[in-house]
Image (cartoon, grey):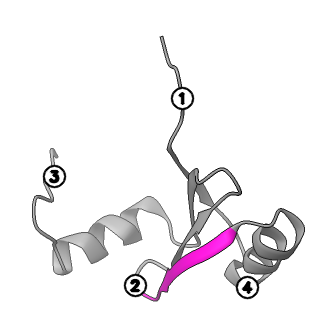
Amino acid sequence: MITEVKHITLSVRNLEESIIFYRDVLYFRLLTKWAEGASLYFLDPNDHKLEIHTSDLDTRIKTAKAHPWEELEFFF
């Protein structure tokens, strides 16, 4: 049984509009913004993490393969 959700990722069309919505309307706190993969990380008022990005899965995988981080594993 699922008892809680700690991290959700959403794909959006416009990163700048999403910043305004999540920060100013929903009062999420912007934690990071990074160019590769065009991603943002927010915390909601209860400290649940939300990741939003504008790239598709293929682009994100290509970027991760080009710039891997420690303990990153691919299974395909």
* SS under mark 1: loop
Q: Residue at x 43, y 60 (%)?
A: 57
Q: Neighbour class for label 2 at 10 Å: few (<14), some, many (≥20)?
A: few
Residue 8 position, x and y percent, is 55, 48
Mark 3: amino acid: Phe
Q: Nearer the viewer, residue 14 or 58?
A: 14
Q: Which residue is mark 2?
A: 36
Distance, label 1 to label 4, CA atoms, is 29 Å
Q: Which mark is residue 35?
A: none
Q: Earlier in the sequence, mark 1 or mark 2?
A: 1
* SS under mark 2: loop
Residue 5 position, x and y percent, is 53, 35
Q: Which residue is mark 3?
A: 74
Picture quadrant where residue 70 is located: bottom left
Per the image, is 45 magenta? no
Distance, label 3 to label 2, CA atoms, is 18 Å
Q: Neighbour class for label 1 at 10 Å: few (<14), some, many (≥20)?
A: few
Q: Is residue 2 above or below residue 59?
A: above
Mark 2: amino acid: Glu
Distance, label 1 to label 2, CA atoms, is 29 Å
Picture quadrant where residue 30 is located: bottom right
Between circles 1 and 2, the one closer to the viewer is: 1
Determine the residue located farthest toward the right in the rendered image.
25
Mark 4: amino acid: Glu
Q: Which mark is residue 4?
A: 1
Q: Which mark is residue 16?
A: 4
Q: In the drawing, does residue 69 fall left or right of residue 4?
A: left
Mark 1: amino acid: Glu
Q: Neighbour class for label 4 at 10 Å: few (<14), some, many (≥20)?
A: few
Q: Neighbour class for label 3 at 10 Å: few (<14), some, many (≥20)?
A: few
Q: Earlier in the sequence, mark 1 or mark 4?
A: 1
